[in-house]
Image (spheres, rainbow, N blue to C red):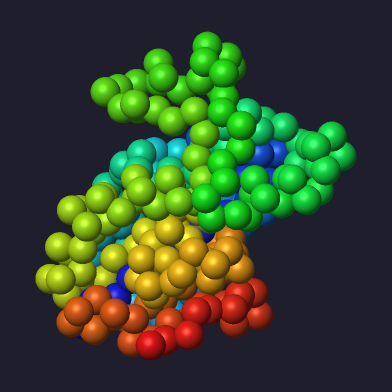
Amino acid sequence: MPTLILLRHGQSQWNLDDRFTGWVDVDLTPEGEAQAKKGGQLIREAGLLIDRCFTSVLTRAIRTSWLALAAAGQAYVPEIKDWRLNERHYGALTGLNKTETAAKHGADQVKVWRRSYDVPPPPLAPGGEFDFAKDRRYAGVATPATESLKTTLDRVRPYWESDIVPHLNAGETLLIAAHGNSLRAIVKLLFALTDAQIIDVEVPTGNPLVIELDAALRPRSARYLDAARAQALPELA
């Protein structure tokens, strides 16, 4: 039976600083490291045996996967990194303090940029500190200047279908250690959620979401391993 474990990275330094992070390569805080290790311990206690791990090319997700796999006693599991599992690109909001941005532009406007499905923030101007076009991780990639959840899903979907689904069809148990919005994109695909339904879905940091799938890769069951820190899950069909 194919099983998917979704693990959002632990707290990063810019999470702590209340800044829009997106594609900026920020590391975990000590609390974030503890969250990742706790996630791995929960995976071990649940008796889940992982066949393969997927993660983004951002340090906070990569280190979360390493810490979780080590704590699960499965540090040897093969790992694949791909930029298409990156967090959404926050455009011109990148690096800004969220509270200060709300004070400047209005809380309602910032809520639209953060939580709407298809309204991206203003684009990032080229050539600045957070222009990733020359980062070798993205060689040959037309890097975005901003993204909504919709355009994040547009880049996640082909990778999901070409690189991840075949392993699930083979009955493997996969860990995806990634980011709030790339994981929400996968949840939208798996649960066939509407554009309106996905807006209210939140994936907590460091809490493994275990989804058991049927032969057609439809969710049969879904649960967070840390019930005390769980968020509401979509209803199963």
Left or right of residue 170: residue 1:
right
**Rendered view: 139 above or below 236:** above
Question: Is residue 120 shown to the viewer in this render?
Answer: yes
Percent x, y of residue 23: 51, 35
Splitting the image into 4 quarters, where does residue 217 fall? bottom left
Q: Is residue 38 visible?
A: no
Q: Quadrant of residue 48?
A: bottom left
In this view, which residue lies farthest toward the right?
Answer: 103
Residue 153 x %, y %: 40, 52
Residue 108 x/y as whole percent: 78, 50
Please tell me which residue lies in front, 182 or 78.
182
Please identify the quadrant where the N terminus is shown. Answer: bottom left
Identify the residue at horizontal 26%, vertical 50% (top origin): 159
Q: Decide: is 218 above or below 149.
A: below
Locate residue 22 relative to residue 192 in the image: left or right.
right
Q: Which residue is drawn at 26% across and 23% down?
A: 140
Residue found 45% across the figure and 51% down from its top: 150
Nearest to the observer: residue 57 or residue 201: 201
Residue placed furthest toward the top: 127
Q: Nearer the viewer, residue 73 or 136?
A: 136
**Label total for image:** 0
